[in-house]
Image (cartoon, grey):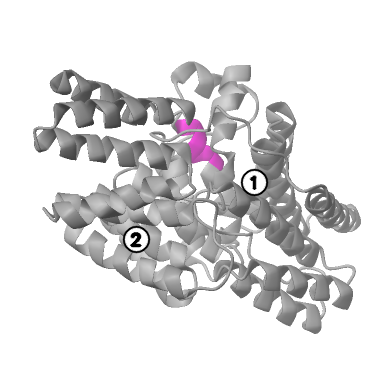
């Protein structure tokens, strides 16, 4: 059972979808006055545009405008969680594709004041939602608000506290609450996001783990889950943008790249200040075997990165150079690609990013007939990728190492 829970909650970041890319459950009309409504909409746009600090202040203003607005507290909690994830550098699709997994090295604890503020905000959101349900057990919006808040707490517990069983309990409640929403008001398609995500996650597990998840109260079904998420993305509700980000991740996992690129095009238009959407566009094109288009998006994104004075995600510049270097090498622009890859390993970054950069450098050395250099680069790639739990890259480096012997 523990192994099943661990596998399911490795992917729990799907629920608020921040770990892959960027999101915070969009903020709906529950319990709010008009001033809070306006402020929450502003804060939501700021989050999606990577204006994290502005979003925190805006949501604090929304809370001050209406102390009974559960969604305002939830928005504040989302923005605070995002600051933690940003510092850790695990906000890309690569972190959730399966080839790059949770690092073997424990992440440093979050700043105590940020963790405390997150817990205060999310507990208040949950408390207000429960009070609303106590007054009317068939209040679909109150059940939805509770599901979204509890799902956010589940994601935080799993990804920050690393307490898998506590997260499991919270996630099951979120799933059950959104199923209630679907029963009480089937027209509210945004409620399908949480249910669809968990159904998809369960469907990706091995059979014994799926059975354990079913016994714990989670449903499965890959296509059913994707359909629910797609309906949430098409529905003009408060989860629409979250559902689009979720689809980017899931469609990449399913290798349905053209569909993922359609979602990314919409997100680029909606949130032009979110440079990470350009990174994900380039990465998706690389996976699709379209390096020419990938290089264009990655070069545009690097220009945005250079002009952007806001704080950057941990290891972000290294990741940009690795991705573009890979694209340039595929295009036969070896010198430019090698320069990007060498720049990637010089910069602060995640071990898997450095490891994959060394993997590509080793491949280049091998093609150039420099076996000694290739062996050195590939040994380094293996060491770094093993430390960051990237088995696919380790296996590829070992195969190349045999050719370099």
| Residue 22, x across and y down, in percent | 54, 58
Q: Which residue occupies 45% across, 36% down?
A: 221
Using the image as rendered, state which of residue 37 and residue 228 is in the foreground.
37
Q: Secondary structure at mark 1?
A: helix
Q: Is residue 209 left or right of residue 160?
A: left
Using the image as rendered, state which of residue 104 and residue 341 is in the foreground.
341
10 Å crowding of disc 1: few (<14), some (14-19), many (20+): many
| Residue 284, x across and y down, in percent | 31, 54
Q: Which residues are magenta?
A: 198-203
The picture quadrant where one finds residue 321 is bottom left
Q: Earlier in the sequence, mark 1 or mark 2?
A: 1
Q: Secondary structure at mark 2?
A: helix
| Whether residue 353 can be seen here | yes
**Does the magenta run of residues contain 2?**
no
| Whether residue 214 can be seen here | no
Q: Is residue 341 left or right of residue 120?
A: left
Q: Quadrant of the C terminus?
A: top left
Q: Which residue is mark 1?
A: 179
Q: Is residue 190 above or below residue 218?
A: below
Q: Is residue 160 left or right of residue 131?
A: left
Q: CA distance from mark 1 to mark 2?
A: 33 Å
Return the mark for residue 256: none
Dot in front, 1 or 2 = 2
**Does the magenta run of residues contain 202?**
yes
Q: Which residue occupies 52% across, 65% down?
A: 241
Using the image as rendered, state which of residue 389 and residue 341 is in the foreground.
341
Q: Is residue 265 left or right of residue 24?
A: left
Q: Which residue occupies 64% across, 59% down?
A: 25
Return the mark for residue 281: 2
């Amino acid at each position: 059972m523990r192994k099943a829970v661990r596998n399911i909650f490795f992917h729990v970041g799907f629920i608020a979808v921040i770990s892959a890319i960027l999101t915070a459950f969009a903020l709906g009309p529950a319990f709010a006055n008009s001033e809070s409504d306006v402020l929450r909409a502003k804060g939501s746009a700021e989050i999606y545009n990577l204006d994290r600090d502005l979003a925190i202040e805006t949501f604090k203003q929304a809370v001050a405008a209406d102390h009974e607005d559960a969604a305002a507290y939830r928005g504040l909690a989302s923005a605070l969680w995002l600051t933690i994830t940003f510092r850790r550098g695990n906000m890309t699709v690569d972190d959730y594709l399966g080839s790059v997994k949770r690092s073997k090295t424990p992440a440093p604890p979050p700043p105590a004041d940020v963790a405390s503020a997150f817990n205060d905000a999310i507990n208040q959101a949950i408390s207000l939602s429960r009070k609303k349900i106590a007054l009317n057990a068939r209040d679909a919006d109150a059940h939805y608000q509770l599901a979204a808040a509890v799902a956010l707490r589940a994601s935080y517990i799993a990804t920050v506290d690393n307490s898998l069983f506590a997260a499991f309990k919270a996630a099951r409640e979120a799933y059950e609450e959104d199923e209630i929403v679907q029963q009480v008001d089937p027209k509210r398609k945004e409620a399908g996001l949480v249910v669809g995500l968990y159904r998809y996650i369960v469907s990706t597990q091995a059979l014994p783990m799926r059975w354990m998840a079913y016994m714990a109260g989670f449903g499965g079904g890959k296509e059913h889950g994707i359909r629910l998420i797609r309906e949430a993305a098409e529905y003009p509700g408060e989860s629409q943008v979250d559902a689009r980000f979720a689809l980017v991740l899931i469609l990449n996992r399913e290798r349905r790249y053209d569909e993922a690129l359609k979602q990314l095009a919409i997100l680029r238009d909606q949130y032009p200040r979110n440079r990470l959407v350009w990174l994900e566009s380039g990465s998706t094109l690389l996976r699709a075997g379209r390096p020419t288009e990938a290089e264009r998006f990655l070069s545009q994104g690097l220009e945005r990165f250079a002009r952007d004075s806001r704080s950057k995600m941990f290891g972000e510049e290294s990741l940009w150079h690795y991705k573009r270097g890979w694209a340039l090498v595929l295009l036969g622009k070896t010198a430019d690609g090698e320069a990007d890859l060498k720049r990637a390993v010089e910069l602060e970054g995640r071990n898997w990013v450095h490891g994959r950069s060394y993997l590509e450098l080793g491949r280049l050395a091998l093609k150039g007939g420099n076996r000694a250099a290739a062996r050195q680069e590939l040994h380094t790639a293996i060491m770094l990728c093993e430390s960051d739990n990237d088995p696919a890259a380790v296996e590829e480096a070992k195969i190349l190492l045999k050719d370099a012997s």
